[in-house]
Image (cartoon, rainbow, N blue to C red):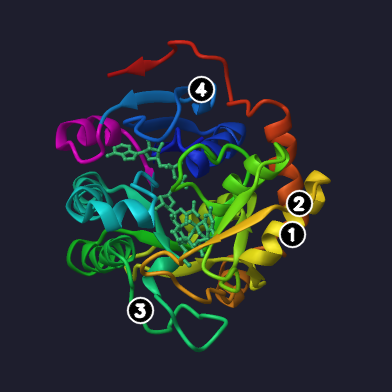
């Protein structure tokens, strides 16, 4: 039974990770400010500290007695970084430097979320981890900064880390309600209600959509390979889907005809994103990823069930 801290554990990916950790018998503590996460996504059996991960006192309290920290708390939106680069930088990079520093004090291993946004728009696909990193957004630049600080924390201070460059993650409990939500959650929500969807640009832009269960499997494997060498891994499927194709497939799963409107492309938009999963397969032993259509069916089923969280709202084990 490991003692594990999950920052951002009430969020989309964090809640799935906590579910896996509690199920395998770990003692799980969550640090989350509930800015985008929901208390009803707190896994029963996990302890919750409601605080800002950038607050050094709260972080020290949260890390006390822990062996591993999964650091997922972030402003997980490229668009928010465009509008407020200073505010998102404080959470996405400065707070991560704090996590590595606290981990060094306490001998804690850190497994953290990076992003495919570190690569920017590359010509050579699929993208391997050794490809150049040329982020096109503040969000991507901050995630790359996290990786650089992980390396320094390892080399200079002996902190064991592993970083994961998630491509476009989707699944149940991804919030569809903000205009900055992931495209799959927005399209599933709208098409399942027979509403039109908006495509930014011509819809020919492509993404590598990875199901959240595959992300959890990668993070759990990351614990084993975390080292002072600060390894990084893609979390992807190696399959490319255009946004237009995606709208068509979701409409099919929902049993409706897609009503699509087109608007100008977003600024800093990446045209093609496709990851290589070779390192994850060979080093972490990751299995064949879930098929897109099967993953979309999971999302639609969750939406049709009324978007349940992991528990009913109750005040158990919460400190603020
Ligand atoms: P999410 O918004 O659902 O989860 C983020 C969680 O962090 C939320 O529970 C939020 O309340 C919490 N949080 C935010 N700021 C905080 C702060 N200052 N202090 C404490 N808690 C804070 O997003 P997600 O999609 O689950 O993302 C999890 C991680 O994965 C993030 O680091 C994100 O950048 C990364 N990531 C996500 C994707 C994706 O496609 N969803 C892709 C690449 C990387
Ligand atoms: C980036 C990162 C991803 C993650 C995410 C966090 C890349 C390749 N991906 O995802 O890893 O960090 O940011 O936010 O860097 N779209 C529409 N209509 C909509 C919504 C989106 O057309 O209503 C398009 C959007 O313009 C983009 C695609 O769908 O081309 C995917 O958008 P997204 O916001 O889901 O994620 P993206 O690729 O910005």
- Nearer the N terminus, badge 4 or badge 2? 4
Q: Say which residue appears at 54% left-offset and 51% top-offset.
A: 220
Residues under labels 3 and 2: Cα distance?
35 Å
Task: Point out residue 107 in the picture as x, y percentages from the top left corner.
Answer: 27, 48
- Nearer the N terminus, badge 3 or badge 2? 3
Residues under labels 1 and 4: Cα distance?
32 Å
- Nearer the N terminus, badge 1 or badge 3? 3
Residue contact at pointers 1 and 2, CB within 8 angstroms? yes
Q: Is residue 42 visible?
A: yes
Residue contact at pointers 1 and 4, CB within 8 angstroms? no
- The front one of 91 and 317 is 91
Residues under labels 4 and 2: Cα distance?
29 Å
Q: Quadrant of residue 280?
A: bottom right
- Nearer the N terminus, badge 3 or badge 4? 4
Q: Nearer the viewer, mark 4 or mark 2?
A: 2
- The front one of 275 and 317 is 275
Question: In the drawing, what numbered circle is on residue 186?
Answer: none
| Kind of element beneath mark 3 | loop
Q: Nearer the viewer, mark 1 or mark 4?
A: 1
Residue contact at pointers 3 and 2, CB within 8 angstroms? no
Q: Say which residue appears at 50% left-offset and 76% top-offset.
A: 271
Q: Say which residue appears at 60% left-offset and 77% top-offset.
A: 278
The residue labelled by disc 4 is: 40
Question: In the drawing, what numbered circle is on residue 251?
Answer: 2
Task: Point out residue 115 in the picture as x, y percentages from the top left corner.
Answer: 42, 62
The residue labelled by disc 3 is: 133
Q: Quadrant of residue 193?
A: top right
Q: Residues within 10 Å of mark 3 (few under 14, many from 20)?
A: some
Residues under labels 3 and 4: Cα distance?
37 Å
The residue labelled by disc 1 is: 248
Q: Examine the rendered structure and indicate whether residue 266 appears above or below residue 301.
A: below
Q: Which residues are magenta?
A: 52-69
């Amino acid at each position: 039974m490991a003692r594990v801290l999950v920052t951002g554990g009430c969020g989309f990916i964090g809640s799935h990770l906590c579910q896996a950790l509690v199920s395998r018998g770990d003692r799980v503590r969550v640090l989350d400010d509930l800015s985008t996460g929901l208390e009803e996504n707190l896994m029963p059996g996990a302890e919750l500290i409601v605080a800002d991960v950038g607050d050094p006192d709260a972080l020290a309290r949260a890390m006390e007695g822990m062996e591993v920290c999964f650091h997922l708390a972030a402003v997980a939106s490229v668009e928010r970084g465009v509008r407020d680069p200073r505010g998102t930088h404080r959470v996405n990079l400065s707070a991560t430097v704090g996590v590595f520093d606290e981990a060094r004090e306490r001998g804690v291993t850190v497994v953290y979320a990076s992003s495919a946004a570190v690569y920017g728009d590359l010509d050579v696909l699929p993208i391997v981890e050794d490809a150049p990193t040329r982020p096109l957004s503040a969000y991507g630049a901050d995630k790359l900064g996290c990786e650089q600080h992980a390396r320094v924390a390892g080399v200079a201070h002996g902190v064991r880390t592993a970083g994961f460059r998630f491509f476009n993650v989707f699944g149940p409990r991804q919030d569809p309600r903000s205009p900055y939500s992931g495209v799959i959650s927005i399209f599933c929500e709208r098409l399942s209600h027979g509403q039109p969807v908006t495509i930014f640009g011509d819809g020919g832009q492509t993404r590598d959509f990875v199901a959240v269960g595959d992300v959890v499997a990668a993070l759990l494997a990351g614990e084993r390979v975390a080292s002072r060498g600060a390894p990084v891994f893609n979390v992807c499927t190696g399959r490319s889907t255009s946004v237009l194709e995606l709208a068509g497939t979701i409409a099919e799963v929902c049993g409706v005809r897609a009503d699509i409107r087109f608007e100008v492309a977003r600024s800093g938009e990446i045209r093609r994103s496709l990851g290589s999963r070779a390192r994850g397969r060979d080093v972490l032993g990751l299995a064949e990823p879930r098929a897109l259509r099967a993953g979309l069916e999971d999302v639609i089923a969750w939406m049709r069930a009324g978007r349940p969280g992991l528990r009913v709202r109750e005040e158990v084990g919460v400190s603020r």
